[in-house]
Amino acid sequence: MDIRTQMSQHTFRRLLALPQPLRLRTFSILNRPPPNYPGHVPLTLVERGALALGSAFGSLRNPHRHDLIAALGEATAKPYFIARLRAAMLANPTGRRILRDKPRITSQTMSLEKLRQLPENTVGRAYAAWLDREGVTPDTRDQVRYIDDPEEAYVMQRYRETHDFTHAITGLPVIIEGELAVKAFEFANTLLPMTALSLVAVVRLKAVERKRFFETYLPWAVGNGLKAEEVINVYWEEELETDVEVLRARLGIEIPPDLRETRKLLRDKNKAERAARDAKDRLGAGMGL
Amino acid sequence: MAGLLPRATKRLRLSPTSGIICRDCRRAVTSSIRHSQQQQPAPSQHVSQSEKTTHFGFETVAEELKASRVRTVFSSVAASYDTMNDLMSLGIHRLWKDHFVRSLNPGIRPTSYSQSAAGQTILDIAGGTGDIALRLLDHATTINRDNGTSVIISDINPEMLAEGRKRFATSPYYASTATSPNRRVSFLEANAEDLSAIESNSIDLYTVAFGIRNFTHKEVALKEAFRVLKPGGVFACLEFTPRLSNPIMNGIYKRWSFGAIPLIGQVVAADRESYQYLVESIERFPSQPEFASMIEEAGFIVPGKERGDGGELQGGWEDLSLGIAAIHKGVKPV
């Protein structure tokens, strides 16, 4: 074997030794590898980039397209961020148990009837109360499809399914303001890029809401997200009967000001002011001024 | 913030695991996921050896199930059908459909000698959203000044027909007017393999655009077409071809089909699977010579055909856009 073949073989072997995310092209669109789990769709780098761009703009135009937000999360999670999250789960004993048991949260596994029976101030009751207040259900979230490693795919699925629990223990509502606050908290806590990219939706807020977000909720989210424990490591199925305050103290989360209450107070105040102004105008008109 | 830094920097640690999992652990994880998700096996696994199967894209399904699977696909694509067509073909589908209708020249030009203004009866199969039917009526009315030609739009899927009704509601063809006392468009929900609602020898022109690749039994549909057409009537089919003749263009085209189209389906229509099915069904469609022989076997005369060496049919169809789509025509013998 001459020196050139030796060199190229050596380089070739070193290329194959690289972890898969770093190899730029491992397969083509027409020759996809078999799926690693049911529903898995292996994507090439170009497809992933196009999916990320398309779902980013699509979800900005229509925030109700939760499937696009999910796709954005999956397209941007590799190579580093989902691996980091999985490593964080493996570093924690509860996280390791979650990865071993792989529990799923669906409307079958989380019976709302039973949760509503739980005593006040338990996590399960707070979750059920939050679902009822916001008018949502623990319906099956979109399945993870575009993450290649099955365990990382489970981590993503778990993050998606426990998002509502994060809402429940912080009390933030499903309106855009509340969602953005939760996403900011999740970015500081999980470092998933999709959570940071969702914050671009700040442009859709009204000026008053934006001011409130930057003054109160963003600092709350970043501060609490950074100092809290990893929320992904909470075994929610076992914490349903824990007291919410105890759980919050254990995780290191302070509850933010109630967003719905704040908005309601502001609305009522504006309505009262407008009513007073109308009454004064009418009075003035009656007196011929 | 100083208290936050250690935990935050621990999170940012740039070398978590190397990402490599040994083969045994990966196999253990995959099998545990597959085990926990083994609720309902795919329907194709229930097909016994004696039942007949057919292809549904790259999947194999029992024959009875294919029609309902196709119906489900088109229920979910109905609402965004036209937008998706524009995005997938970059608007070129409009040129194909215009050319298709123009080459058929529907409508009878009235002369001073013609007595009746009966016009032609056209049957548009799998024409749910009505884009071919509208073009046919427009051509007959504006170019051939024929106010009597009418179109029956038939589709297996009620949602697609509903989209068609919406399109026609704002057109002059839906209501009966002074110049055209009979309604010029009607809607029929039917499977193309069973057109018993239509009399034999009653249709002047049978068109099917981008529909026939979804039929379970194309030969049965061709035989039905033969039955309902009048002697001298024309069968016209606009359909995608399974591959282009130029290998480089074919490579680019296939990568667009299998890569971009399901992606656009996901982003625009929230449905990757239906568009994956669509591109797979194109792969499974017979090539132009094969399809032309199927048309001949149903009894039609295929105009412009020649037998090349090897007995293969040549020239009995028209390729569009380098062979991405093709127009097949047949005439029922008089």
Image: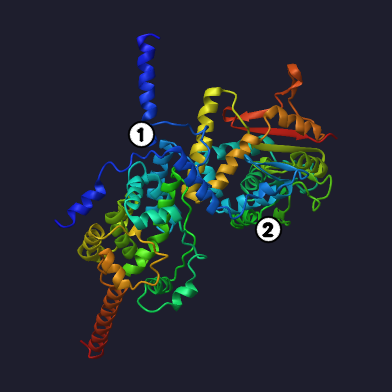
Say if B82 sits above or below A121 in the image: above
Q: Left or right: B112 with respect to A256? A: right
On the image, the x and y values in percent for residue A251 come to: 28, 64
Q: Residue at x 35, y 16 (%)?
A: A7
Which chain is disc 2 placed on?
A: B
Can residue A55 be seen here?
A: no
Q: Can marks 1 and 2 be said to lie on one chain?
A: no
Read off the residue under disc 1: A22
Can residue B111 be seen here?
A: yes
Read off the residue under disc 2: B177
On the image, the x and y values in percent for residue B302 come to: 76, 29
Q: Left or right: B172 with respect to B114? A: left
Say if B288 sits above or below A227 in the image: above
Q: Secondary structure at mark 2?
A: loop
Residue located farthest toward the right when viewing the structure as drawn: B334
Which chain is disc 1 placed on?
A: A
Type of amino acid at the residue the image marks with label 2: Thr
Q: Residue at x 72, y 54 (%)?
A: B188
Type of amino acid at the residue the image marks with label 1: Leu
Residue located farthest toward the top when viewing the structure as drawn: A2
Badge number at residue B260? none
Cα distance between the residues tagged 1 and 2: 68 Å
Crowdedness near tag 1: few (<14), some (14–19) or many (≥20) residues, C-alpha within 10 Å: few
Marks counted in the figure total 2
Crowdedness near tag 2: few (<14), some (14–19) or many (≥20) residues, C-alpha within 10 Å: few
Say if A269 sits above or below B50 in the image: below
Which of discs 1 and 2 lies nearer the camera? The answer is: 1
